Amino acid sequence: MVKQLVYIIILFCGIVHAQKIDHLVSYRDIFSSNYFRFNYDNDYFAASDENYTQGYNFELVMPVLSKNPVNTILFKLNNSELRYGLSLEHIGFTPDNYDLPDIQFGDRPFAAAIMLKSFNISSNLDHKIRMHSSVNIGIIGPGAFGEEMQVEIHRATGNKTPRGWKQQIKNDVVLNYSIGIEKQVLGIKDLVSVKAQSNLNIGTLFTNASVGANVMIGKFQNSFSSTNQNRKFQIYTYFQSVFTGVAYDATLQGGLINNDSPYTIASEDIERLTNQHNLGIVVQTRTLYFEYTRSIISKEFSTGSLAKWGGIRVGFTF
């Protein structure tokens, strides 16, 4: 079963961008079956205000969520440790001159999406393989209230007022299925870990696939150690590099059903291969989780530019 799933994902990667808020990757593990975490991204951390401008995610993991009927369509590894969760996620995108009311031709369109995610995480200690899968249901467009949120934040911080949201991607349904696999290829005690990874997203918001690797260095709890004890204190840094093949991106091209958006990026102008780098530091105690991260991604359409942002994550076990 494990080998079959790996082959399937590799196949898709050969023919078909990772989520902006990737809260399920292993270097963000919280070793508890009960936890809550708030994930927040903003390009303010990178002294920017364009492209991926903001995102947040409220994440809850509890054993009782194993009764969620959506779990029946989620993949999981055989003979694995399992965790189940729900999250509420919101992402927003703007062009560079967001304060202008007119369409910014050649730049990305305004877009926002909000979605409810059901997910699981399974880890097979014997094979040192970790899998996550999820289903996202929501909306892209004015119904995701991206305009209201950005206007209020800019008003509170004294920045220029965004005036171009009337040109945003119009309302459409978000229905996405995601699956990701990580395989540890090197582990040196609980000080160094190197994992290969692959992710596949299929749906109306993003259809893409990615391959890459992530490295953890520091003092941490190894995801695949059978002798794990919940550490009182962990501190480590990580680096991740991901190459993504893009088939469809509704935040650029508009929804699949509603074609009335005033401005979108044409299919032939989409960059079909992107590269994203993520770097961060994590501090954990037995009950608390803190993280600061920075990210950069190559341009996602022909007339675009690379995008930078940062983020914080705060969580606790219970």
Image: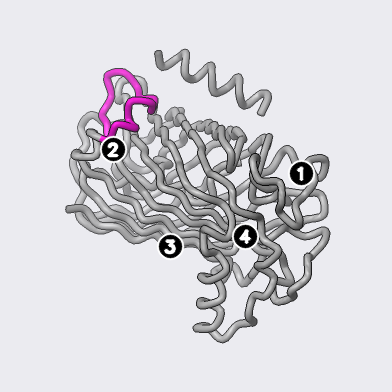
Residue holding disc 4 = 93
* Distance of label 1 from label 4 (alpha carbons): 16 Å
Label 4 or label 3, whichever comes before in sequence order: 4
What amino acid is found at the position of numbered circle 1 in the picture? Ile
Residue 52 x/y as whole percent: 61, 59
What amino acid is found at the position of numbered circle 3 in the picture? Ile
Residue 173 x/y as whole percent: 54, 44
Residue holding disc 2 = 84
Tell me if residue 251 comes above or below residue 5 in the rendering: below
Task: Kindly indicate whether the residue at mark 2 contacts the one at mark 1 (C-beta within 8 angstroms).
Answer: no
Q: Residue at x 47, y 34 (%)?
A: 195
Q: Give neighbour class at mark 2: few <14, some 14-19, many 20+ (Cα, 10 Å).
A: many
* Distance of label 1 from label 2 (alpha carbons): 35 Å
| Residue 200 location, quadrant | top right
Residue 78 colored in magenta in the image: yes
* Distance of label 4 from label 2 (alpha carbons): 29 Å
* Distance of label 4 from label 3 (alpha carbons): 18 Å
What amino acid is found at the position of numbered circle 2 in the picture? Tyr
Tell me if residue 198 comes above or below residue 160 in the rendering: above
Residue 216 x/y as whole percent: 43, 44
